């Protein structure tokens, strides 16, 4: 395994979706380039972070992985619930989050974000498609505001951003790491998966 890049930021993989648009198929176990998406993500995270956490509400499916398994504390709160759980259980003050179904995560960009993490509460890429809140670094300072949003049943991730110091990574910087910007691609549906993995068609 490559040497670990940092012990100052925890890495969290979110794998708690309903998979309803995947016909009930767990996206984490889709095979891509010879390995499951979840194995691909954990392998990358282990080279970057001393602490790797997987947030899932079906931990029994992931016992074979070398990662700490945690579940949502506030259930049925979508991705924001997973972010809350990752922040709550992380040992580090800053936490990098990515979804389990992102096969093209860019190691260089993640390292760049880690290097900037000390000066901000939130670091989030701003691609031409908008903010990428599921490829971001958040401070544990955000926990109280997230819990307040839960009490109001407000589950939009960027809803907790106001009031915190935010660094938005511009498209110009993002393009230096990945001119195609495919690092933010994910498999939200069978159709999206088939665009990337044509052999799954049919």
Image (cartoon, rainbow, N blue to C red):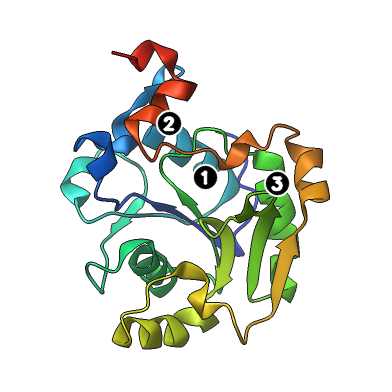
Whether residue 36 is visible: no
Q: Secondary structure at mark 3?
A: helix
| Left or right: residue 180 compared with residue 201 | right
Looking at the rendered image, the disc whose residue lies closer to the viewer, 2 or 1, is 2
Where is residue 144, by image quadrant? bottom left
| Left or right: residue 183 compared with residue 51 | right
Task: Name the residue located 34 percent from the left edge and 68 percent from the top edge.
Answer: 81
Task: Name the residue located 38 percent from the left edge and 70 percent from the top edge.
Answer: 89
Whole-number angstrom distance, CA of label 3 to CA of label 1:
13 Å
Question: Which residue, given by chain and number where applicable, does mark 1 sit on?
Answer: 45
Task: Name the residue located 33 percent from the left edge and 86 percent from the top edge.
Answer: 152
Q: Position of residue 87 (x, y in %)?
A: 44, 71
Q: Position of residue 91 (x, y in %)?
A: 47, 70
| Mark 3 crowd level (few <14, some 14–19, many ≥20, 10 Å Cα) | some
Quadrant holding the C terminus: top left
Where is residue 77, by image quadrant? bottom left
Whole-number angstrom distance, CA of label 2 to CA of label 1:
24 Å
| Left or right: residue 41 compared with residue 93 | left
Question: Which residue, given by chain and number where applicable, does mark 3 sit on?
Answer: 109
Sequence-first disc among 2 and 3: 3
Q: Position of residue 165 (x, y in %)?
A: 69, 80
| Left or right: residue 102 compared with residue 19 | right
| Mark 1 crowd level (few <14, some 14–19, many ≥20, 10 Å Cα) | many
Question: Which residue, given by chain and number where applicable, does mark 2 sit on?
Answer: 192
Q: Secondary structure at mark 2?
A: helix
């Amino acid at each position: 395994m490559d040497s670990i890049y940092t012990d100052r930021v925890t890495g969290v993989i979110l794998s708690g979706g309903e998979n309803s648009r995947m016909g009930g198929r767990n996206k984490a176990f889709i095979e891509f380039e010879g390995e499951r998406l979840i194995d691909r993500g954990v392998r990358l995270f282990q080279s970057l972070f001393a602490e790797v956490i997987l947030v899932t509400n079906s931990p029994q499916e992931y016992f074979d992985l070398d990662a700490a398994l945690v579940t949502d504390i506030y259930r049925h709160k979508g991705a924001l619930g997973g972010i809350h759980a990752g922040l709550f259980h992380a040992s580090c003050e800053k936490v990098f989050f990515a979804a389990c179904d992102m096969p093209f995560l860019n190691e260089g960009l993640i390292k760049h974000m880690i290097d900037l993490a000390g000066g901000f509460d939130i670091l989030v890429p701003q691609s031409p498609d908008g903010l990428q809140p599921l490829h971001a670094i958040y401070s544990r300072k955000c926990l109280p505001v997230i819990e307040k949003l839960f009490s109001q049943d407000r589950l939009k991730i960027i809803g907790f951003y106001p009031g915190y110091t935010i660094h938005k990574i511009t498209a110009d910087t993002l393009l230096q790491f990945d001119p195609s910007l495919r690092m933010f691609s994910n498999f939200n549906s069978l159709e999206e998966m088939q665009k990337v993995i044509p052999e799954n068609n049919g």
